[in-house]
Every structure is written in C-alpha cells, then in structure tokens.
Amino acid sequence: MKYGVGAVVGVAAIVFALGGCDRGVAGGEGQAGDVQLGEPEAVYPEPFAVVSTVREFGDGRVLVADPLGQVVVRVDLDAGTADTIGAVGEGPDEYRQPDAVWPLPGGRTLLVDLGNGRLTELSPELRFGETRPYAMVNPEQGTLLMVLPQAVDDLGRLYFPDIGGMGGGADSVGILRIDLETGVVDSLARVKMPDMTRRETGGANNQNVQVSAIPLSPADAWGVSRDGRVAVARSGDYHLDWIEEDGSVTSGPALPYDPVAIGRAEREEWRDARSEVGGGFSIEQTNINGVITIRATRGGVSDDDDQDDSTWPEVKPAFYSRPLSVDGRGRAWVRRHREAGEATVYDVFDGSGEVEMTVEVGEGRRVVSFGDGKLYAVRMDEYGLQVLERYALP
C-alpha cells in the first residue's frame, strides 16, 4: 500500500484525519419524512459515549461496543440491564477502544479492537477467541490492507475501504472484501472520496503527512446487505447503485434535491455532529528504522476545527458521506442533509434503487443498526452522550 510520501528513512508518520468519514446518508425534495419513526419500544437508561454498531442476538439482547467509554456490554433493553464483556487491557480477554461488533456465522461475533490493532472473534457465549491484526498483507499483491470493516455479510465476509488510496491524492477509493477463512480479497467497486487537503511537515527523516477531508464536500456512501449486495449512494446526481456478486449494477433514477446553503449555523452543526462518531478518526503509520507500526484511533482529532472559510463548499451535498445501513429487508437507508436544526430524515431505497419511503427519526437521533424486524437508533442527550433505543422496523 502506498501512502504517497515516497522513500522515507528513519521516522515517518502518516495521519489520516477522517473527521468527515463517519458512520448513514441523504437527498430528495421533501422537507419531512412521510413516515414517522414514532415512540421507541425500549430504551436503555445508561448512556454511551459513542455507538456505531449494535449486534442483535436471537434472544433479543444486543452487544454494544463503546470506543471512548472503552467497554463492551451485552444489553437487555427490555429489562434495562447490561453485562460487561471483557476488560480494558492488552491481554487475551481484553481490548482498548472497542470500536464495532459484527455478527459472524454460527452465532459468533467479530470485535474490532482499535486500540490493540486487532480483530477478535467472540464465541456464541461471548468468550474471547482467535485474534488477528487488522493490518494485513494482501497475499496476491503483497500490499498492506487496513481491514476495518464497514459491513459484514451472512457468509462472514468483511467489507472495507482501501484506505491506502486516501493518502495518495486519489479522488476515489476501492471497496474491498476479504474472506478471513480463505484470505481471498476481492475488489468490488470504487466510490468518490470527499475533497481533501494535504499538509506535510518535517524533513526526510521525520516526515508527517496529514490528509484531511474538507467538511461537507460531496462524497459517495456505501453499505452492504446480508446477501452481499453492495449499495452505493452516488453524490454526482444522487442516485443509488446496487452492485451484485457478479459485478452487474442496477441503478435507480437520479433524485432532485434543493441544496442547503452553508452558513454559520450549518458549520456549527457540522462541528457538533462530529461527536456522534466520537470526533475524528485517524490512522497513523510509523516507520522507525524499518519497523512499521500502524494504529487507528477514534476521537481527539481537531484539525478540521480551524478550517479556513474558503475551504468550505457553498452548499451542502445531498446526503451524509457516512457509511449507510441496509436493513434485513434489503433496503438501503440514506441520511439526508437538511437545514441546521431540522429533524433527521432518511430516504429508504428498495432493491431496484427506487425510494420506497422517507423516514423522519427526529432531531438529534440517528440509525445505527438493524435486527430481526427491529431498528436501533441513538439519541444525543443534553450532555452529548448517546442513548440507545429500539424501534419496530418501518
């Protein structure tokens, strides 16, 4: 994998400040949802710092990973109780910055442990098992992969962006898929990245290259259905592509939308909204005398806070560039951009790329995962913490 820094001797650090690469998406002309989410079926009373994914079990309980709170818990929403799984540390039953939990075949779970640089498999009883680094070498090409899943299908294959393309100035990045059992890596599609700024500091022996997304610049967003179909919301004319296993593409119609002008309120809203995903997300590669280490971190990146006025676009794009979610009925949920202070709205696309409905989920709330006929959302409370809620799937 090439990060666009050339030959470096001594110490080199490359930081991707991905504050604009978050986790949901958007467009359409309507100003409100034609379906209201309504009242939650259940609410867990103890808030989290950050929730990106929820893994539902057959008995209705869910597993939640909180990277900033440094905890993994199994939650019973109906009873309002939770059990802590594992502990903070570097040992075999421990984690640092547990960032996401994904279902695997056979009732297993994949835990993304950002802080320890590894993927950990949990048994159906949530016992800690096999681990492997998320920085892997592609056996066919010899390139470095950062396997940080954005989706997992029913076969247990992991889908992730080719992050190496972010450092070299490319305007698009590949969607990759890996089968952990066989090690086979497939390239499925390319998606447009946000516009980037690039900053280099230091000398040849101590070089730092920082690549940052320009706030609210247009970018594609994507997600994966349980059967492995890839949904891509295209930012050029706002339409949805479904990419099949054989590479064929089904494209929905382009959707008109009214662009929202970016003013002070929209900029403040964007900065505040970064807390939804824990602030910034950075990946740092360090080369010290030929020894390369890679570490991903969520939170604490503030480089975008001092963006010059000229950096911002004039209008918001149609939708958020965060990863979009696909529900159990194979529908892609795309979160719109709206005027500051308006309720969150999702366009819900069917398998042909047509909008089936538009769902309003309320101000300060966003969709994080789906279960068996269920929708899981988090609501930001007055302290900036995230409250987990469960709804019947519309």
Image (cartoon, helix red, strand yellow):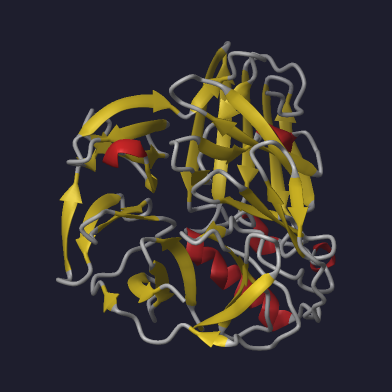
Count of residue discs: 0
Question: Looking at the image, is 234 positioned above or below residue 258?
Answer: above
Of residue 116 and residue 334, the one placed in the foreground of this image is 334
- Position of the N terminus by quadrant: top right
Q: Position of residue 324 (x, y in %)?
A: 58, 59
Asked whether the viewer can see residue 192, the reply is no
Residue visible at 71% across and 86% down in the picture? 30
Q: Position of residue 56 (x, y in %)?
A: 31, 56
Residue visible at 64% across and 42% down in the picture? 16
Residue visible at 29% across and 37% down in the picture? 106
Q: Is residue 166 left or right of residue 49?
A: right
Of residue 15 and residue 354, the one placed in the foreground of this image is 354
Of residue 146 and residue 54, the one placed in the foreground of this image is 54
Q: Is residue 13 left or right of residue 251?
A: left
- Among the 4 quarters of the image, the one containing residue 206: top right
Q: Position of residue 143 (x, y in %)?
A: 65, 19
Residue visible at 44% across and 42% down in the picture? 154
Q: Position of residue 334 (x, y in %)?
A: 62, 66
Asked whether the viewer can see residue 305, the reply is yes
- Among the 4 quarters of the image, the one containing residue 58: bottom left
Q: Residue furthest top?
A: 290
- Among the 4 quarters of the image, the one containing residue 74: bottom left
Of residue 144 and residue 181, the one placed in the foreground of this image is 181
